[in-house]
Amino acid sequence: MANLKTMSAMIQIELALDALGDPTRRAVFRRLRRGNLSVQEIADGMDVSRPAVSQHLRVLKAARLVTDRPEGARRLYTVDPTGIEALRTWLDGFWEEALTAFKEAAEREATEEIKTSKRKKKGRNTHEDRGDDVRRNRPK
């Protein structure tokens, strides 16, 4: 069951990424950040027709990035927080992997620096000890 859920989530992410891959769709999506808007309100000021905006909204809705609700004779569209959360969770996975890799690299580097520092100290102590021996054993 968990595997089926994971597959479903991955399909959802693919749909969302594909939907946001189109620059016009991204522009439509950005406009919806302002809140509930009708197709006409979204299309105003854009270089695409109302029917084209409706088509883009259908794709965004199928990707669960947008929801709509009827209000009188029109529909109002808004960003779907559930779809955004799924996308964010997926993207956070990359961030977590990068942070884990960074932590491991930093820990390796710190361990190497400690080893190098100990070697240098050991080398200095050996040299200093030899110097003392030379001074003590030097003929006067």
Image (spheres, helix red, strand yellow):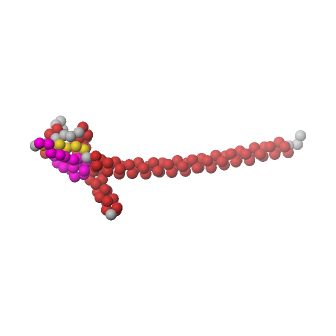
- Decide if residue 18 is in sight here: no
The residue most toward the top is: 45
Q: What percent of the width, then of the height, locates residue 125? A: 73, 45
Residue 34 visible at all: yes
Give yes or no for residue 68 being in the magenta stretch. yes
Task: Pick whichever, 24 or 34, lies toward us.
Answer: 34
Query: Looking at this view, is 138 or 55 the one in front?
Result: 55
Residue 70 falls in which quadrant of the image? Answer: top left
Q: Please identify the quadrant where the N terminus is shown.
A: bottom left
The magenta-colored residue range is 52-72
Viewport quadrant of the C terminus:
top right
Q: Position of residue 3 (x, y in %)?
A: 34, 62
Residue situated furthest bottom in the rendering: 1
Q: Is residue 131 left or right of residue 80?
A: right
Residue at image position (58%, 49%) is 111
Task: Give the residue at x 35% y 51%.
Answer: 90
Q: Which residue: 17% across, 43% down? A: 76
Q: Position of residue 101 (x, y in %)?
A: 47, 51
Question: Furthest residue to the right?
Answer: 140
7 inside magenta stretch: no
Q: Residue at x 19, y 49 (%)?
A: 58
Q: Position of residue 121 (x, y in %)?
A: 68, 45
Determine whether 140 is above or below 8 in the image: above
Q: Is residue 91 left or right of residue 48?
A: right
